[in-house]
């Protein structure tokens, strides 16, 4: 398990949502539970802002899901805030249907959860056409709302931890459509920390701009291939105000740090803006 260097008595980590969210579960798996202070946030922009303002030591943010795909707005936040990426973790996502004790699935009229969670469980609810699926800010807040307001006929898609925290009963366990359902989370450092060279790293996240010209991306890809760099992710974003120009977020995997650095130097003449967002160790996959 990756353990951050910390000279304080506790490590402050800002997450999306409240206690019992998958963000909290990922944080506990990455940092460990000892001397960890979880700071909830209501949305991703607030999360990035809190970290940028120095209100937390680390932040943890979902960036992509193996079923629902990339969380595009978070790539834009990475570019806007320029907070260094210092790690990652992959979490197996188990979605569960929970409600007040004594309720049955047939009693439910509405089910709340984060849009990504709802998307991951659509097939389960095909058998219950009477249930309306409604978006909420996060999985745990949906469970908390049911508990606090004693809502009958209402369910939440959430983690087992959230259901336990808010004294809800599980009506459907592991209801996600695809059982190979993983979310990748990035570990971000506060704004006082610059992206740094990490010779012990095995993975890097970079972003660069390219003009809309024939072969511009192919040149970059061929250079990385020449230096034996594996591209595990490519995500393009249009550059606002520049017609047909794009910003590419790319994750690179490598076994030789020197070759990786040579590749970075070789591609820069063919790009516009080029930034290293972080160099870190390839993340663990947590399946429990």
Image (tube, rainbow, N blue to C red):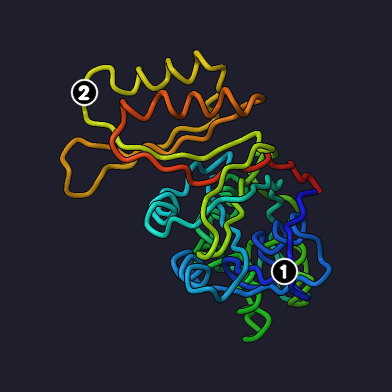
- Precedes in sequence: disc 1 or disc 2: 1
Residue 273 in the image, given as x and y percentages of width and height? 31, 40
Residue in front for this viewpoint, 285 or 159? 285
Is 242 located above or below residue 40 in the figure?
Answer: above
Task: Name which residue lies at 70% across and 60% down.
Answer: 27
Compared with 261, 55 (above or below) is below
Closest to the observer, 116 or 61: 61
Q: Residues within 10 Å of mark 1 (few under 14, many from 20)?
A: many
Q: Which mark is residue 213?
A: 2
Q: Secondary structure at mark 1?
A: helix
Provide residue 181's location: percent of width, then percent of height.
Answer: 65, 42
Horizontal and vertical percent for residue 201?
66, 38
Image side of residue 118 versus residue 248, left or right:
right
Q: Is residue 284 visible?
A: yes
Q: Identify which residue is drawn at 61% across, 65% down.
A: 139
Camera sees residue 126: no
What number is the disc on residue 60? none
SS of the residue under disc 2: loop
Residue ID for mark 1 = 162
Query: Badge 2: how crowded within 10 Å, few (<14), some, or many (20+)?
Result: few
Image depth: mark 1 or mark 2 in front: 2
Tell whether 3 sits left or right of 69.
right
Rendering quarter of residue 11: bottom right
Place of residue 72 in the rendered image (x, y in percent of width and height, measured from the top left): 41, 48
């Amino acid at each position: 398990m990756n353990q951050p260097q910390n000279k304080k008595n506790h490590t402050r980590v800002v997450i999306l949502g409240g206690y019992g969210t998958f963000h909290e579960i990922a944080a506990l798996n990455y940092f460990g539970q000892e001397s960890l202070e979880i700071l909830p946030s209501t949305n991703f922009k607030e999360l990035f802002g809190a970290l940028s303002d120095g209100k937390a030591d680390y932040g943890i943010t979902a960036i992509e899901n193996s079923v629902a795909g990339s969380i595009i707005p978070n790539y834009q936040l990475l570019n806007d805030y320029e907070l260094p990426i210092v790690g990652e973790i992959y979490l197996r996502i188990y979605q569960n249907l929970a409600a007040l004790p004594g309720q049955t699935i047939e009693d439910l009229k509405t089910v709340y959860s984060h849009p990504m969670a709802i998307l991951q469980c659509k097939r389960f609810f095909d058998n219950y056409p009477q249930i309306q699926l409604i978006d909420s800010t996060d999985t745990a807040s949906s469970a908390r709302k049911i508990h606090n307001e004693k809502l009958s006929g209402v369910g939440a898609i959430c983690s087992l931890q959230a259901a336990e925290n808010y004294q809800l009963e599980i009506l459907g366990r592991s209801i996600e459509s695809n059982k190979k359902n993983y979310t990748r989370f990035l570990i971000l450092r506060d704004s006082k920390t610059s992206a740094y060279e990490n010779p012990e790293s095995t993975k890097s996240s970079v972003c660069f701009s390219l003009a809309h010209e024939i072969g511009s991306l192919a040149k970059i890809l061929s250079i990385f291939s020449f230096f034996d760099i594996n591209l595990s992710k490519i995500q393009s974003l249009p550059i606002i105000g520049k017609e047909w120009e794009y910003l590419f977020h790319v994750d690179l995997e490598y076994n030789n740090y020197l070759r990786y650095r040579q590749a970075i130097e070789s591609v820069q003449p063919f790009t516009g803006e080029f930034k290293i967002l972080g160099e870190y160790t390839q993340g663990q996959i947590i399946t429990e």
